[in-house]
Amino acid sequence: QGMQYAHLIGKAGIAQDEKSWAILKDEHGNMYTTNVIEPDIDPEVKAVFDRWRAQKDVEREKFERIDRQLVEEYTRMAEAGDE
């Protein structure tokens, strides 16, 4: 839904676990709802996720670079908000 809705959670536990979603609780007590990918969901949805994971394995370096860039960007944003 856009980068403005993304959150990095350093330490999280599952506060509530449902079939298609879970509520994560971070070390600060903040709670986030997330979708859960399970094998018993719609086979077409699982197939899309499986294709994405396979592509990620093939292009591991590219995805690692993207992950690093996102962490750096969110770190800059977080540090700018503390001023």
Image (cartoon, helix red, strand yellow):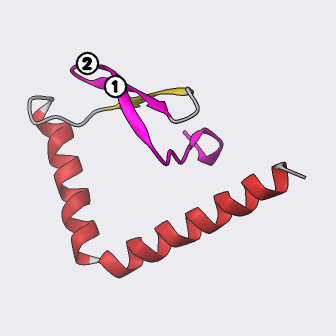
Instruction: Say what secondary structure mark 2 lies in.
Output: loop
Q: Is residue 44 left or right of residue 56?
A: left
- Residue drawn at the location 52% of the way across and 36% of the way down: 27
Q: Say left or right for 59 vs 83.
A: left
Question: Is residue 14 in the magenta section?
Answer: yes
Amino acid type at circle 1 is: Ala
Q: Residue at x 23, y 59 (%)?
A: 53
The residues bearing labels 1 and 2 have C-alpha atoms spaced at a distance of: 6 Å
Q: Position of residue 68 (x, y in %)?
A: 52, 71
Residue 43: quadrant of the picture: top left
Give the label on residue 18, or none: 2
**Residue 47 against residue 13 in the figure, above or below:** below
Left or right of 11 on screen, residue 55: left
At x 57%, y 27%, the residue is: 30
Query: Is residue 5 one of those drawn in magenta?
Result: yes
Element carrying mark 1: strand
Q: Which residue is identified by label 1?
A: 22
**Type of residue at label 2?**
Glu
Q: Which residues are magenta?
A: 1-26
Residue at image x 53%, y 48%? 8
Q: Nearer the viewer, residue 19 or 45?
A: 19
Depth check: 49 or 36 in front? 36
